[in-house]
Amino acid sequence: MRATFIHGIRDVRLGEVEPPPPREGMVTIQVAGCGICGSDLHYYLEGGIGPARIHHAFVPGHELAGWVLQDTPELGLSRGQLVAVDPAHACGRCEWCQRGHVNLCPFVEFLGAPPLHGGMAERVVVHPDQVVPVPRGFSVRRAVMLEPLGVAVHAMDLARPRLQETVVVLGCGPIGLCLVQLARLSGADRVFAVDPVAYRAEAARRLGAHDAAPTFEAVAEWTGGRGVDLVLEATNSPDGFHHAAESARIGGRILLAGIPDGDRYSLPAALCRRKGLKIKFSRRMGHVYPRAIRLVAEGAVDVDSIVTHRFDLSNAEKGFRLQADCQDGALKSIIVPEDGDAPF
């Protein structure tokens, strides 16, 4: 079958891979769409994320949705039914799974993380617990966007926003834009956004930010030098942690959801220590799909406008390039096996 491969840094090509064979107890999905995530861009721009490196060409993609290819009555699934796919299959047995931290399972099988092929292909075979039925009438783009929205929901669970707090979101990619909306829903007094790319900052305003600016120095202006109660960092910058610390008030809180370029942060330690900041890191998500579905179905979060581009498998390289270089207003690009007039 056809698939998009990352061979190395800025090297994305169309190729062929053996279709995954049907396996007893597994579910075969015909992929309808797969989003390009910020972590995919790290593979594209840096050849890896931390210790996860590209040693052989692999198929990326973990934000995916598709159609079930066979009736699966034990799961209540019918052939042709649109479902989202949770990319993570945790072991369920280790100490961390038993503690409820399935997103931190060291034995997880994660689609689109080397060496495991992902969703930028025509078909995938997944475990039953990875199949997430979506409401009738859900579009492909909405089903695809449940994964990045789920990451944002998990981050908010860790951040624990409080009523009438001031919040700033650093980084207005898809995760950041979801965080802006969730911060407004949480009852924040004021929600600000920071992104150096003008069209991304404007998207944050459109989706609910009270104000937006290209640099974190604006936080001091917005708050009279106090800083905000809660910083939600969703950048790819090695300075993101530093800027978050500068933006937080004394005794404030920081939630780090971004992955920094080069796998390194740079910040003065005294800044965090003297402010007595409370800092949490967020990775992937837990069992949050039901809430993500409700947020989209009820119109509480707009994911439709975050999807700006779609490309077929043969043009996936353009999608990676536009998002990596912040060109043509690209926020979220979705790769579809066959582009055309099919409902999206």
Image (cartoon, grey):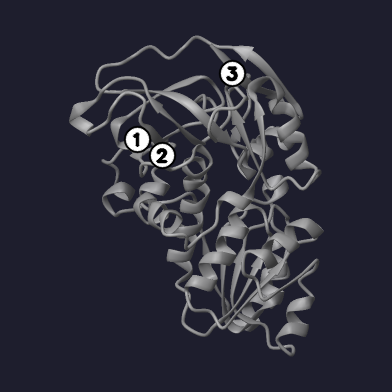
Residue in view at x 47 percent, y 63 percent: 300
Residue 224, image x and y in percent?
Answer: 74, 90
Choose the circle earlier in sequence order: 2 or 3.
Answer: 3
Q: Along the horizontal axis of the image, is 186 left or right of 273? A: left
Among all residues in the image, which is located at the extreme left? 74
Choose the circle earlier in sequence order: 2 or 1.
Answer: 2
Disc 3 target residue: 3
Q: Amino acid at mark 1?
A: Val
Corner quadrant of residue 126? top left
In the displayed structure, would residue 106 be above or below residue 294? above
Out of 335 and 232, give the one closest to the viewer.
335
Residues at marks 2 and 1 touching, judged by CB atoms closer than 8 Å = yes
Residue 187, image x and y in percent?
Answer: 49, 78
Q: Secondary structure at mark 3?
A: strand
Residue in view at x 77 percent, y 29 percent: 10
Q: CA–CA distance between discs 2 and 3?
A: 19 Å
The answer to whether one can see residue 28 in this image is yes
Residue 289, image x and y in percent?
Answer: 38, 49
| Label of residue 86 in the image | 2
Out of 18 and 146, give the one closest to the viewer.
146
Number of labelled discs? Answer: 3
